[in-house]
């Protein structure tokens, strides 16, 4: 029998029993669509997080006071009070050739007020470098001036939302606002960015780091952001940072250095595993579709006993019958899978319309996997019915009418 | 051409044994016309199935064209059925979702005959059975006689050496039964061996050779000189 005839015969039988075919296509399509939609969502979440991290800055290292055994864990060891991480520590890091920029950071919250309007806000104390390390842009005015980080200065930069809430339509630049019990002059406004990981820059007020330390009456930095010169320089930068701080802290390793890469790959792995798990669960529905196909094919074989007997009488070997039925199931699952793929992509597209922030994308392995599993289950589960058909006794099959 | 020697066919139903063929020996020459008669359950269909390689003897020998066919593989037997044997059944056994043309082409599809040649042969054979204007009708759009003519066309499209017809007129009125028989006899005139199972004595009389079966045995085997 020619391949085109085998396929043609299979498709014609599928068309001949349209209700049954429709239901099986539906089962297959739902299974594949589920895999595609769920993996698309998982992949979308992963891409989202990865993009967020990348936007935090590149070649970034984060220095935290206190030592922790695992990177990324909370920077605390029981029973040990970490030594302060100071501005001088931060400045010293510039000695490393692997380091391009250093931005010391102090974070706290305080009331911000202008005339009668006021609200709680996150206050970030840092230096001019903060702008470049975090890849921020200005909407108005200037960022913090290039001054000695140890020097306080009563100037501040507002996040876009803070500016809006305090000043509305009025001019903000040059005005004096009150942070806690001190007055700061507004010298700039940050551009708003649709970023959600880390601190939301729309709702912060940035002041010079020394001013923030005195505002919160502390000597210790919250952390230090370090930008390495290149991606390759990150390990060297990490080593230099540890060495420099150790030499300044009487030989004690009392800081934690997290590289952005390590953090990112942790998240990446977790989300990838999550996507795989979800895909696996969805694939179960494919197996269910496979079992359904087996059942329906078994019914088909007993319904078409006379036809099978006839085909044998006309010169079809058992092998030929087997191939015909397996082709039928294969065509069924393939068409169902392609249908499911289309439905799944459409579903992904619709979800994308509702959540534009989520970069929905079906990973190629999900598409290949869903098609392969669909075709595999279809073929596997049609084997039993097809073999039953192939072994049918033609004389007996034809004597029944 | 066909030689059966001491063929037995025993069916086992539960713990009961049915001796459907009991020591049947038979020689059939090329282009013979044989009518097979006998009461219901006497083993006519069983014998025809064995002749058509749809069933295997429990014991005995079957030589077709000088070849011991009981020893052949499934594949080889299928090819034998395809190339040498044409079946016509009482209940037509057309594939309901296929048109007359497609039903007739089925053996050629199974044999892998090229599409162009299929078309030529189908239209020639449709003409021979007088169904050119019904070529694209499905079986449910055809009368019983027309269906049986489609079945005959299908049985002959591979130009077999033998036609095995099991009560081909059993489901037809006498007029279309006669049409069908005429067509079969015309095939026989062209040297195809024709074996027809029938309950109708008038039909049986048209054959030169008549077999009568009782209880799985050939009870009588008579040959008259001429077809009437
Ligand atoms: N597949 C089968 N299983 C069991 N018994 C069968 C089978 N086929 C035929 N028989 C029995 O064999 C005998 C001959 O049957 P059959 O050849 O169909 O008779 P006929 O065609 O002459 O009416 C009957 O008794 C029938 O019941
Ligand atoms: Mg019978």
Image: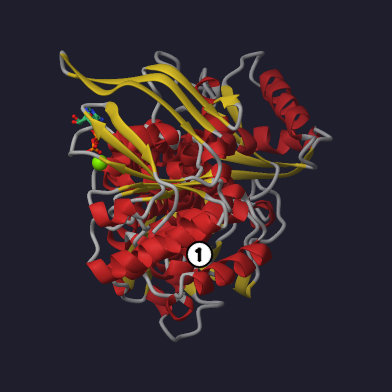
Q: Is residue B228 visible?
A: yes
Which residue appears farthest toward the front when viewing the image?
Answer: B225
* Quarter of the rendering containing residue A339: bottom left
Q: Position of residue B144 (x, y in %)?
A: 28, 67
Which residue corresponds to mark 1? A194
- Of residues A154 and A13, the one nearer the viewer is A13
Specify the color scheme: secondary structure
Q: Is residue A275 left or right of residue B91?
A: right
Residue at horizontal 78 percent and vertical 28 percent from the top: A236
Give above or below for A175 relative to B6.
below
Which subunit holds the residue at mark 1? Answer: A
Q: Position of residue B148 (x, y in %)?
A: 35, 62
- Of residues A348 and A256, the one nearer the viewer is A348
* Quarter of the rendering containing residue A19: bottom left
Residue at horizontal 30 percent and vertical 56 percent from the top: B203
Label 1 residue SS: loop
Within the displayed image, which quadrant is ligand 2 positioned in?
Answer: top left
Q: Is residue A349 left or right of residue A22?
A: right
Residue at horizontal 51 percent and vertical 29 percent from the top: B74
Give above or below for B164 relative to B11.
below
- Of residues A268 and A166, the one nearer the viewer is A268
Mark 1 neighbour density, 10 Å: few (under 14) some (14–19) many (20 or more): few
- Of residues A119 and A337, the one nearer the viewer is A337
Q: Is residue A214 visible?
A: no
Q: Is mark 1 within 8 Å of ligand 1?
A: no
């Amino acid at each position: 029998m020619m391949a085109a005839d085998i396929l043609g015969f299979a498709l014609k039988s599928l068309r001949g029993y349209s209700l049954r075919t429709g239901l099986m296509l539906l089962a297959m399509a739902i299974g594949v669509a589920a895999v595609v939609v769920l993996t698309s969502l998982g992949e979308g979440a992963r891409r989202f997080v990865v993009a967020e991290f990348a936007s935090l800055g590149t070649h970034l290292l984060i220095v935290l006071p206190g030592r922790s055994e695992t990177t990324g864990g909370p920077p605390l060891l029981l029973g040990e009070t970490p030594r302060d991480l100071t501005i001088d520590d931060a400045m010293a890091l510039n000695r490393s050739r692997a380091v391009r920029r250093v931005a010391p950071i102090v974070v706290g919250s305080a009331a911000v007020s202008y005339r009668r309007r006021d609200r709680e806000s996150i206050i970030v104390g840092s230096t001019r470098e903060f702008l470049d390390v975090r890849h921020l842009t200005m909407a108005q005015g200037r960022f913090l001036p290039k001054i000695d980080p140890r020097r306080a200065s009563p100037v501040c930069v507002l996040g876009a939302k803070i500016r809006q809430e305090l000043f509305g339509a009025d001019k903000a630049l040059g005005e004096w606002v009150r942070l806690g019990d001190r007055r700061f002059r507004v010298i700039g406004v940050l551009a708003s960015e649709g970023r959600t990981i880390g601190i939301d820059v729309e709702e912060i007020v940035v002041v010079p780091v020394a001013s923030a330390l005195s505002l919160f009456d502390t000597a210790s930095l919250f952390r230090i952001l370090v930008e390495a010169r290149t991606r390759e320089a990150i390990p060297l930068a990490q080593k230099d940072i540890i060495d420099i701080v150790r030499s300044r802290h009487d030989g004690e390793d009392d800081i934690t250095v997290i590289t952005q890469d390590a953090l990112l790959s942790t998240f990446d792995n977790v989300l990838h595993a999550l996507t795989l798990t979800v895909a696996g669960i969805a694939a179960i529905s494919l197996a269910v579709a496979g079992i359904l196909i087996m059942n329906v094919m078994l019914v088909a074989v007993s319904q078409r006993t006379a036809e099978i007997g006839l085909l044998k009488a006309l010169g079809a070997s058992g092998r030929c019958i087997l191939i015909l039925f397996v082709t039928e199931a294969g065509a069924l699952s393939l068409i169902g899978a392609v249908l499911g793929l289309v439905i799944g992509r459409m579903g992904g597209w619709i979800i994308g319309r509702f959540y534009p922030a989520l970069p929905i994308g079906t990973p190629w392995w999900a598409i290949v996997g869903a098609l392969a599993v669909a075709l595999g289950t279809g073929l596997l589960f049609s084997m039993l019915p097809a073999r039953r058909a192939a072994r049918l006794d033609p004389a007996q099959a034809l004597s029944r009418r | 051409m066909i030689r059966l020697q001491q063929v037995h066919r025993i069916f086992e139903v539960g713990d009961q044994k049915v001796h459907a063929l009991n020591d049947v020996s038979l020689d059939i020459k090329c282009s013979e016309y044989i009518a097979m008669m006998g009461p219901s359950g006497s083993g006519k269909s069983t014998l025809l199935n064995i002749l058509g390689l749809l069933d295997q003897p429990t014991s005995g020998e079957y030589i077709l064209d000088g070849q011991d066919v009981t020893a052949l593989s499934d594949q080889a037997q299928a090819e034998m059925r395809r190339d040498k044997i044409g079946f016509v059944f009482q209940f037509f056994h057309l594939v309901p979702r296929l048109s007359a043309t497609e039903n007739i082409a089925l053996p050629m599809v199974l044999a892998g005959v090229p599409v162009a040649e299929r078309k030529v042969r189908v239209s020639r054979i449709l003409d021979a059975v007088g169904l050119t204007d019904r070529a694209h009708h499905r079986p449910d759009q055809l009368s019983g006689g027309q269906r049986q003519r489609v079945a005959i066309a299908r049985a002959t499209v591979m130009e077999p050496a033998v036609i095995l017809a099991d009560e081909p007129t059993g489901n037809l009125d006498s007029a279309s039964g006669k049409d069908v028989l005429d067509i079969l006899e015309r095939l026989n005139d062209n040297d195809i061996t024709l074996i027809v199972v029938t309950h109708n004595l008038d039909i049986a009389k048209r054959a030169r050779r008549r077999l009568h079966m009782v209880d799985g045995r050939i009870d009588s085997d008579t040959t008259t000189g001429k077809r009437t």
